[in-house]
Image (cartoon, coloured by chain):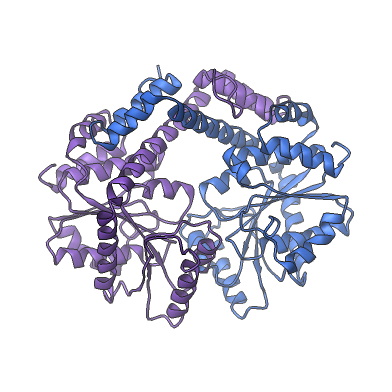
Chain colours: A blue, B purple
Amino acid sequence: MRAGDKRALARAITLVENRDALAYDLVREISPDTGRAYGIGVTGPPGVGKSSLISALVRHVRGKQRSVGVISVDPSSPFSQGALLGDRIRLADHFLDPDVFIRSMGSRGHLGGLAEATLQAMLVLDAAGKDLLFLETVGAGQGEVEVIGIADTVLLVLMPGSGDSVQALKAGIMEIPDVIAVNKMDHPAAKTMVNEVRSILTLDKERAWKPPIVLTEAVTGENVDVLWQKLEEHRRFLEENDELDARRRRNLAGEVFAVASFRAKAHLEHAVADDPELRRLLDEVQRRELDPLTAVREIMEKVFRIGDTNGSDPP
Amino acid sequence: MRAGDKRALARAITLVENRDALAYDLVREISPDTGRAYGIGVTGPPGVGKSSLISALVRHVRGKQRSVGVISVDPSSPFSQGALLGDRIRLADHFLDPDVFIRSMGSRGHLGGLAEATLQAMLVLDAAGKDLLFLETVGAGQGEVEVIGIADTVLLVLMPGSGDSVQALKAGIMEIPDVIAVNKMDHPAAKTMVNEVRSILTLDKERAWKPPIVLTEAVTGENVDVLWQKLEEHRRFLEENDELDARRRRNLAGEVFAVASFRAKAHLEHAVADDPELRRLLDEVQRRELDPLTAVREIMEKVFRIGDTNGSDPP
């Protein structure tokens, strides 16, 4: 696996996805060898061409002899099984390239905590010596934020028609990414979209790094070199300002925290499913014989042995 | 408060937002008197006119003498402090109407768990005798799903240009709502948007309730009566098929669960912040002296006294 053998990598990530007991030993063993790969998170609404853009970026960096891992947690991604014929053809080269490893994390990963499975898969690919890791996620909800939280550089992909995302950026609901690509640059409204996004970004004068906006055409590969250059510039910016280590420390702590929270939630689910008394509590709430907060309080005491958690610290 | 006194209601919801100890007693006391109000969740991307549409719906139902509560958890909503002059004028009537209570839940509510604060605020307004409760949320991420999970009927508001949301519906990433409004109907692309959404919905032939799509113009009030009719039809559909009680039971159980999960997470945050040993664990992960999964395992044991939670049940 450390040599980058594809079958070994695939087996390792399957262990992780299945929450196999061996995955734990594996991650513990490889952990000291991680931290070398550079992680690029690629996010954006479905249908904007994130996978095509990653595919084009992979082609570009393979020309520079960099080895690559791709993890997709986007259920609408062509990297998943549902690839269209055209996508399949475009992706085929990469699947045959021994220095490119592509994996989509499906719903199995979701059951076991997507953030957790993704974190581990990234560590596996990192230890396997991949220079660059692309992490594809959809949307900008809380779950996605936790998944993409492990990336060093975040690329947001939009296209003409991504009005909702532009509004979400404007309203401060979507976090400002490090680099923005407006894909499908041949669309007549592409430049209008760039201007809209630019006007939003200029409102934030405090930011030391000004997120560049690049018009791309993933299918033809147009401007993908410029996009890569901007991603590299962000990396250099982080490195030259001693920000990369700080960001990685924050990201890693955040991920550990997200995983622990998820596990607490999973533990709660198990407990409620298995315990007739806890299920009875929920029934009483449903019949309005018990108020919801008392139910929560009793559940917390029973499942976590936590007393009153109503905003104050536990005893 | 039960008589619907505005100042009393405002104070009660402030208790809830501040996670005041009295809020617990309050909710316990009023809980048996709840379950009469009908809750309509209004969701959609920022900028599509959700608040204007709610405002127009409130005007419409006030003509039918129905009392109304509005809770907005959308940070970009004009119901929040940042209302534009035009919005203020449109909202002013409602603020003066004794039978309409409007409240936005701010970031304070977020710190204490938005789902929890919203659930309690809805119970308060329900006990105060409001016939209809509108709950405004932004987006379609996981956090929003938990907040809107308490609604009996979910209305999704889109506008021409909401391409990202249409793609999210198409990809199955956004849940199908009960009613859809395409607002800003005078826009030349409004009908195209309706057709796009309709073609997505027709793919789902299994669904007993076919979500209607209504073109609206919130600012002029055009078609707001039709939209209200569709919302009422959905309510009747639920009632006539014995679905309303079942849905409410599911919703309430889901909310109790969401609140308990949030509290577990908050408890974890407190514990890590206060405990030097847990902070040291995170430091070790950051220096790659400890792998992330061992850190999670130790945190779980220390904070929740839970053993190996790696997918299996606790001892």
Percent position of residue A185, x then y = 67, 74
Image quadrant where residue B251 sits: top left
Left or right for B82, reference B302: left
- Residue A35 can be seen in this image: no
Question: Does residue B281 sit above or below B234 in this rendering?
Answer: above
Location of the C terminus of chain B (image quadrant): top right
Q: In which quarter of the image is the N terminus of chain B?
A: top left
- A6 lies left or right of B265: right
Task: Give the residue furthest to the bottom.
Answer: B188
Residue at left offset 55%, top offset 24%: B313
Look at the picture and state if A34 lies above or below A132: above
Classify A130 as above or below B229: above
* Residue A27 percent across, percent down from the top left: 73, 30
The picture quadrant where one finds residue A26 is top right
* Residue at 54% over, 34% down: A262
Q: Which residue is drawn at 32% across and 75% down?
A: B217
